Image (cartoon, helix red, strand yellow):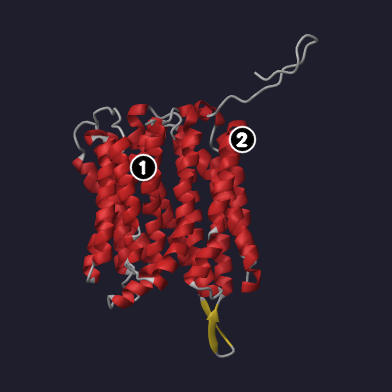
Amino acid sequence: MNQKIAVSVVYVAALFINIMDVTIVNVALPSLGRDLHVQPTAVSAVSIGYLVSLAVVIPASGWLGDRFGSRRILLTAIVVFTVASALCGLAQTFAQLVIFRVLQGVGGGMLTPVGMAMLFRAFPPIERVRAASILIIPTALAPALGPVLGGILVSQLSWRWAFFVNLPIGTAALVFGLLFLREQQNDPPGAFDLSGFLLSGFGFGALMYGISEGPQTGWTDAEVLATVVAGVALLTALLIQQLRSSRPLLGLRLFRDRLFRSVNAVMFLTTAGFLGTLYLVALFFQDGLGLSALQSGLSTFPEALGVLAGSQMASRLLYPLIGPRRLIAIGLVGIATTVGLMALIDSQAELWWMRLLMFALGYCMSHVFVPAQAGAFARIPHRDTASASTLFNAIRQLGGAVGVAVLTTALTAVGVTRQHGGEIVPHLAAYHVTFLVAAGLALFGALCALTIHDDDAASTRTARPRLRRPSQREPIAVD
């Protein structure tokens, strides 16, 4: 089988369940907390444990893929993720669930960077925009489908099915990979950088924990402050150690490439704004407008349709025509405008307007994700693809956590409820202010996009057709 197809099928299926799992579990948290007799304030450990595990494993994933083979590590990651999903569904105590959730994060942390590296190795630079349009399927569809599917599973069956739903897809991806996926030729990575792994693991883990806990317990909480400060200190030490090492775990020197550096800055801010907005929209629908989890999911789903529609326009026409710089900047301005307009919604009577804005959000987002993922690796040598993929995914993961933390902090600062006629009612102004904060993140990303140079991504763009002047002997021709 053509390896472009084989890698695309396995990676898209695995990434789909990886991303969808997060949104489904968020819907299931209240139900599993009640069933396992856990206080609502403590149930977030299920999500935080997963995020911290991802942060620890992602930095080592590139080295593992190069050392033991990308195919072997990708399929192992699918096995770990799928088995851990089954164990989460079978957990009898909350402690067991958290442990199995951490194990699930180990699989997810290996899966994304290794699979992305395989995908971009399978597609030559001129076809990278095609690969990016493939990646948009799980990254767009999964976050929108997750709340819908989660609402159905939790209400009709049990919270355990939030994990069991991963089994058929994970098993199918594994069988398909065993049959059709071939090993890629990778350069030997050298000895494992243990010091870099320990610094990155503890540093990213501590920072992710602090960022995740800060909005809930308060940024002045001693534990939150200690973990954030420790995370920043360890990552600073990591930066110094990696730049001095002859065989670094993380290829930080890749940031010397201005295209890779600019695109990663854009992706950090874009992911912060996008995932933060999806999180905020779910709260706005359920806590602000009083929709059920299923109604909320159905109202969010137009975002996925917008991404799928926009990705075709972005990849087939606009990216080859105008390049990444203007396309990303225009997309981010569109995102900022769309999210800003959400601040005008204040009742269920305007729900169809909100759904239209969700479609527009997805459409504009595709004009950022497709060119960013296509252009990021344009000047990265083949031997450094795994390291570049590791950095790209680590930054994107951190951006998502920061975005949720920033928007949650803004929401909490204004206050999600207020007194009205002697009753506690939702304070929609808090959501409106937070939508404007998310729009600000997108505008900041648009400014960063202006640092991108289209010429740097020339290898990923097909030649534009040019019209020649017709002569008396020949009709108009296209080169």
For residue 453, the mark is none
Circle 1: residue type: Val
Q: Which amino acid type corresponds to the residue marked 2 in the rendered image?
A: Leu
| Residue identifier under label 2 | 317
Q: Is residue 191 left or right of residue 287?
A: left
**419 versus 63 height, above or below:** below
Farthest top residue? 473
Judged by depth in the image, the label closer to the viewer, 1 or 2, is 1
Place residue 180 in its image quadrant: top left
Out of 118 and 4, give the one closest to the viewer: 4
Task: Tell how many labels.
Answer: 2
Residue 310: percent from left, percent from top = 58, 45
Q: Which mark is residue 10?
A: 1
Q: Position of residue 392 (x, y in %)?
A: 40, 42
Q: Residues within 10 Å of mark 1 (few under 14, many from 20)?
A: many
Q: Is residue 380 above or below residue 25?
A: above
Kind of element beneath mark 2: helix
Q: Position of residue 311 (x, y in %)?
A: 55, 43
Look at the image and tell me whether residue 251 can be seen.
no
Residue at (57% x, 41% y) in the render:
312
